[in-house]
Image (cartoon, rainbow, N blue to C red):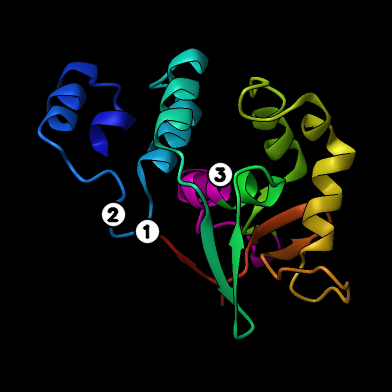
Amino acid sequence: MLLVLYNKLKLMEYFLAQEAKQKLTDHKNRTVVHMALLGYELEYLDLRRMSQLYLQFQLPFIKCKAKDRIIKISPKYMEYFLVVYLQAVRDAIIESSDPQSMQGLKMDEFMEFIEEMPESILPAYRRKRQYVNSVLVNNEINRDYQYNRFLFERKSRGCYNLNPKMEVLYE
């Protein structure tokens, strides 16, 4: 996974040729896809390389366990991208010294990253602020909405983190 984060292509190809397990997670439950997103966030990877890695190692789905339900989320849904992105970058962006109400990513931080995503990862309509905001709002843990997946906790206006009681499962 660190090879992806630091863009060590030759070593990564070597391990893939040796049939290295691609679905392993690190101690923070992050996969290779998380490392590609984090590598781009930290500017170790350019957009083209991150996109290639994201698409190459993207899992067919993630499972999120919240409120005694396990929900399967496909990459075709924006929720998939938002959960994976938050899981990947939150430790690099959120400062422990921040006030509790700011212990999350702000909409501007989401949008700065999301607007740069290529069409192959996120179609244009999903890169719009209004769309991203609606997905976050409709999946807040305290929201009464029929299709709520309880994925995000709103810390303050426009500031979100993952549901602290949610478990993300990879197979």
8 w.r.t. 142: above or below: above
The residue where tag 3 is placed is 85
The residue where tag 1 is placed is 29
The kind of secondary structure the magenta stretch mainly shows is helix
> What is the three-letter code of the residue carrying label 3?
Tyr
Among the 4 quarters of the image, the one containing residue 149: bottom right
Q: Name the one closer to the observer, 16 or 88.
A: 16
The residue where tag 2 is placed is 26
Distance from disc 3 to disc 1, alpha carbons, whole Å, reads: 13 Å
Distance from disc 2 to disc 3, alpha carbons, whole Å, reads: 15 Å
Circle 2 residues within 10 Å: few <14, some 14–19, many ≥20? few
Q: Position of residue 143 (x, y in %)?
A: 84, 73
Q: Name the one closer to the observer, 45 or 96.
A: 45
Of the numbered discs 3 and 1, the one sitting upstream in the chain is: 1
Q: Is residue 9 magenta?
A: no
Quadrant that contains the C terminus: bottom left
In the image, the segment drawn in magenta is 84-101
Circle 3 residues within 10 Å: few <14, some 14–19, many ≥20? many
10 w.r.t. 167: above or below: above
Q: Name the one closer to the observer, 43 or 52.
A: 52
Q: Position of residue 19 (x, y in %)?
A: 15, 37
168 lies left or right of 113: left
